[in-house]
Image (tube, rainbow, N blue to C red):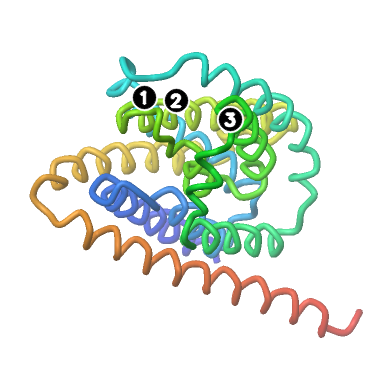
Amino acid sequence: MPSSVPLLEAALVLVGFLTATLSGVAGMGGGSILIGVLLVAGLPPLEAVPLFAAVQLVSNVSRTTAYWAHVDGRATGWFLLSAVPATLLTVGVAARIDPEWAQLTLAALILFSLAPAPSARLQQMPRRQMLVLAGALNGALGNVVGATGLFVGRLFLRQDWSRHTTVGTLALTQTLGHGLRVIAFGFAGLSVLARPGLLVALVLAVMLGTALGRRLNDRLDEARFAQMARAILVALSGALIISALWTLWTSNSTPPA
């Protein structure tokens, strides 16, 4: 119903604010929760992914600016070496993926990212190889599910980097990845301006939520909020799986006209 559209968009803006606040306090999960809610709410991936990319592009710029002095510039170059071709070459494939499979892929990646990380094996991976892999995953899977920070971020947890270098370099690569996605979907005829009002409202909501989260960070229990984020991510994964399987089952069981 047309009258329900403004209500849905208002709810999505509220979710954007809350997830950004949660991410600002817990340091994880906000982006994945937001894209998951966009998909569960019924936005097709062709609309949700570029919209999400534009919102996260703005969000990550502020984090990149804050940690700019700690960014590893050479690492960013190796990331782009694979991220650029992966993003541009897979956008056509991503545009043809059914929404249900995008939901299942996102759910699987979220659950994988919450599993214990094989830290020793990742630490032994050469830095250049790790960054090229991160760029390829960001480009290819990001075109399908939008959010890549949870699982790609594991590759940036290196003993030879300080915490500030990890945060700053990951933020810059995420900024570049989302920027590439906006460009790639634009070339494919899928503009981020399809819903300009929702885009502007989400950007403002995420910026305000991030600022509030940072202010609350020193006052609240970060570990408790991280546990809350994990619980929400698990529940969201379940909702994505149920939604996708229900749609697949009902579409297959519906007799042809």
Mark 2 surroundings within 10 Å by alpha-carbon count, few (fewer than 14), some (14 through 19), many (20 or more): many
Residue that carries the numbered disc 2 in the rendered image: 172
Residue 34 rendering spot, x and y as whole percentages: 44, 53
| Residue in the picture at 52% in, 53% down | 118
What amino acid is labelled 2 in the image?
Leu
Badge 3, how many Cα within 10 Å: few under 14, some, many 20+? few
Label 1: how many Cα within 10 Å (few below 14, some 14–19, many 20+): many
Q: Position of residue 8 (x, y in %)?
A: 44, 60
Q: Which residue is mark 3?
A: 126
- Label 3 close to label 1 by CB (< 8 Å): no
Q: Earlier in the sequence, mark 3 or mark 1?
A: 1
In the picture, measured across the screen, residue 67 lies left or right of residue 87, that is left
Instruction: Residue 73: give x, y in percent of width and height.
Output: 47, 14
Question: Disc 1 designates what residue?
Answer: 64
Distance CA(mark 3)–CA(mark 2): 20 Å
Q: Residue at 52%, 20% (x, y): give it.
A: 76
Q: Nearer the viewer, residue 49 or 238?
A: 238
Q: Residue at x 65, y 64 (%)?
A: 104
Closer to the camera, 225 or 48? Answer: 225
What secondary structure is found at the residue carrying circle 3? loop
Amino acid found under the numbered disc labelled 1: Thr
